[in-house]
């Protein structure tokens, strides 16, 4: 019906009856080797709850992690969809490398199992990829590494993710960056020697990727004690949660 032929009062009543647009909230979950965090964001990616955190059990199985997520979610309030960062290779919601967790993760469909538990749509991405989405500007070549229990990595070109970039492991043998820069290595050799390794790794990554910007996250980024080169900066671990909004854009 043409609104020109409808009385203004009828149009106004119709407008009043319309329900206000619902703000879609996203639950973001960051699964790490040492901790699991959860946070709810609005559609603009702004936090609307206080982040919850729990320790990750050593050699954690899928069942243990799902139980922790269920417990964290109870304190986060209403949400309509879920983003998850996992410390390993993820394809279509299924885990194909377990990182520092239990071997049972290999082949585990994390998105499907969480959808059963939470009764909400779930999207799962590598945790470094998700942190990258929370940090990058979307301009040029941007590399993200996370220094934590292990070493995570993500590569973006003009804001587009290059999937499953894993620089932690050396398939040709020798010592991998995982073994040189992970938390066990830091504790074994001490912060001074570990920092020298990080500095050399930054130089190597620049030669390999010729990045415009390198972002360094993860808990051990706080242990860096040297002046970072131009184009290199540390970022907050909160990006690992805030990047979850990008999975739904």
Image (spheres, helix red, strand yellow):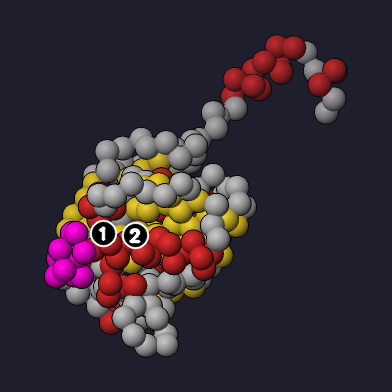
Tell me what residue is drawn at x 48 percent, y 48 percent: 231
Q: Is residue 106 above or below residue 217?
A: below
Give percent across and percent down for residue 138: 58, 47
Residue 10 relative to residue 65: left or right: right
Q: Mark 1 = which residue?
A: 195
Q: Is residue 19 left or right of residue 9?
A: left
Q: From what the image shows, is residue 227 above or below residue 204?
A: above
Calculate the distance from the C-alpha at mark 1 to the C-alpha at mark 2.
6 Å
Nearest the camera: 103 or 176? Answer: 176
Neighbor class of circle 2 (other Cα within 10 Å; few <14, some 14-19, many 20+) is some
Disc 2 target residue: 199
Residue at 51 percent across and 65 percent down: it is 207
Q: Secondary structure at mark 2?
A: helix
Asked if the magenta segment contains residue 87, the reply would be no
How would you classify the magenta stretch by its main secondary structure? helix
| Residue 190 on the magenta segment | yes
Q: Residue at 15% of width from left, 63% of height from top?
A: 190
Nearer the observer, 235 or 210:
210
- Which disc number belongs to residue 142? none
Q: Are marks 1 and 2 in contact (CB under 8 Å)?
A: yes
């Amino acid at each position: 019906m043409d609104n020109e032929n409808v009385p203004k009062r009828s149009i106004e009543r119709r407008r009043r009856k319309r329900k206000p647009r619902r703000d879609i909230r996203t639950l973001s979950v960051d699964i790490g080797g040492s901790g699991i965090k959860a946070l709810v964001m609005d559609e603009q990616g702004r936090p609307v709850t206080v982040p919850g955190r729990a320790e990750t059990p050593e050699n954690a199985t899928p069942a243990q992690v799902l139980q922790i997520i269920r417990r964290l979610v109870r304190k986060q309030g209403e949400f309509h969809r879920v983003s998850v960062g996992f410390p390993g290779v993820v394809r279509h919601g299924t885990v194909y490398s377990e990182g520092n967790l239990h071997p049972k993760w290999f082949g585990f469909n994390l998105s499907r199992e969480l959808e059963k538990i939470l009764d909400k749509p779930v999207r799962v991405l590598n945790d470094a990829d998700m942190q990258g989405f929370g940090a990058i500007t979307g301009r040029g070549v941007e590399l993200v590494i996370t220094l934590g229990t292990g070493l995570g990595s993500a590569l973006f070109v003009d804001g587009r993710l290059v999937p499953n970039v894993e620089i932690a492991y050396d398939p040709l043998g020798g010592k991998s960056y995982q073994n040189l820069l992970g938390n066990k290595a830091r504790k074994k050799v001490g912060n001074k020697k570990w920092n020298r390794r990080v500095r050399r790794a930054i130089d190597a990554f620049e030669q390999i990727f010729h990045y415009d910007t390198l972002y360094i996250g993860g808990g051990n980024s706080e242990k860096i004690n040297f002046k970072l080169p131009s184009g290199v900066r540390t970022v907050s671990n909160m990006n690992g949660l805030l990047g979850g909004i990008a999975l739904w854009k």
